[in-house]
Amino acid sequence: MVSAVKIAVVGGGYGAKVVLPVLCELEEFEPVAVWSRRPDRARELADEAGVALGTTDLDELLGVPGLEAVHVATPVTMHADVSIAAAQRGLHVLCEKPLATDLAQARRVAAAVAEAGVVGAVNYGRRFQVARGRLIERVREVAGEPRMVLVSLVHSDHAEPGSRPFTWVQDAEMGGGRLQGYGVHDLDLLLEAFGPIEAVAVATEVGVPERADADGAVRVVTAEDTYTILMRFTGGGLAVVSLVATAHHKRGDVIEVYGSGGTVKLDADRRLWWGRADGELTCEGPLEASSRAAYARVARNFWSAIRDGAPPDPSLDEGLRVQAVLDAVHRADVERRWVEVREMT
Ligand SMILES: NC(=O)c1ccc[n+]([C@@H]2O[C@H](COP(=O)([O-])OP(=O)(O)OC[C@H]3O[C@@H](n4cnc5c(N)ncnc54)[C@H](OP(=O)(O)O)[C@@H]3O)[C@@H](O)[C@H]2O)c1
């Protein structure tokens, strides 16, 4: 018998699709409350999950008797306030990525968690998907120093004005954009596999400039749906990280690593190809890329940090290292120049 952590989920999007169902399945957690902006939706989510409280009132949620932890899955601009409020009440915090809107705010989250003496973690779980986890292992085995790394994501979910309604995701002021959606996971992967990033140059675009919101009002899209990041690793080697969300024909993620010691490639069908410099490429897969399984691992790690004192994984420090690069990416995009990551720290 494990000692289940009483947890609340703040957010009814990814929080309802992935976080809450996974937490309900894990014996390590007992979900006791869920937050949505809308009262009906909050109650519906609570009923569906068999959770006692569904509320729009964050204070009520954070004050549930016996509550020990929260998962914060709100728009990015709310992450810091909710996480800090939770830590100040002595609650352990698992925050969505990116930790905050910028590094200064993310550091305030880390400081509040440290001051409260609670566990803090950030959900960079995509690197725990089997396909990406195996890629990192093979990189460590055969790639050596990176010479060129290519990460290419091609999605079609933003291809038409009607393919997604306007929400905070299309609003730069609310921390939206595909960089916060996917780019940060790929930055996290590269930092994990290859170490620090020295500098970035960036271009972003909005391919579909107007979308109707849920009420049918036409809104101007201010957050990027397309980006390319060119980067140089501190230890040498270049990478190109790109995403287009407005393609008419989507394709699986492609990640290619050309290193001093060999080659590792994840193809669009999630087959992993790898080989040393003097050998043929070996193929394994197709490999799993389940979001739920990846989140289950993040949640179990969070539990181990709370109950056993294990180091949080992914940790807030890992959240901060991505945040520094993300700040550099935003500045490079606005100022249209190479930006050194250390300028941001
Ligand atoms: N780790 C991952 O793989 C992963 C995957 C997806 C998303 N995420 C992260 O999860 C977080 C939430 O994303 P999401 O896709 O779940 O977003 P979402 O579905 O649009 O909204 C999440 C929650 O925030 C509320 N909300 C939406 N717009 C708001 C606004 N303008 N002001 C206040 N509250 C608002 C929603 O209210 P309602 O309940 O009323 O709809 C919902 O409860 C983000 O940080 C995102 O990066 C992570």
Image (cartoon, helix red, strand yellow):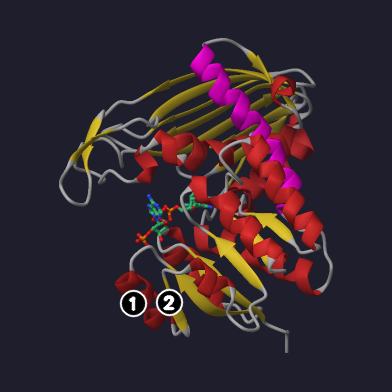
- In the image, what residue occupies the spot 41% across and 79% down? 46
User: Could you tell me if the residues under marks 2 and 1 are in contact, i.e. CB atoms within 8 Å?
Assistant: yes
Q: Earlier in the sequence, mark 2 or mark 1?
A: 1
Q: From the viewer's perspective, is residue 55 above or below residue 163?
A: below
Q: Quadrant of the N terminus?
A: bottom right
- For label 2, the crowd category at 10 Å Cα-Cα, with few meaning under 14, some 14 to 19 and many 20 or more, is many
- The residue at which mark 2 appears reads as 54
| Rendered location of residue 196, percent (x, y) | 75, 29
Look at the image and say whether residue 59 sits in the magenta stretch.
Answer: no
Q: Residue furthest right?
A: 309
Q: From the viewer's perspective, is residue 266 above or below residue 215?
A: above
Q: Residue furthest left?
A: 216
Using the numbered discs, state the Cα–Cα distance from disc 2 to disc 1 in whole angstroms. 8 Å
Q: Which residues make up the magenta segment?
A: 314-335
The one nearer the camera, 180 or 264, is: 180
- The residue at which mark 1 appears reads as 44
Secondary structure of the magenta portion, mostly? helix
- In the image, what residue occupies the spot 26% across and 28% down? 209
Q: Quadrant of residue 54?
A: bottom left
Which amino acid, by three-letter code, is at mark 2? Gly
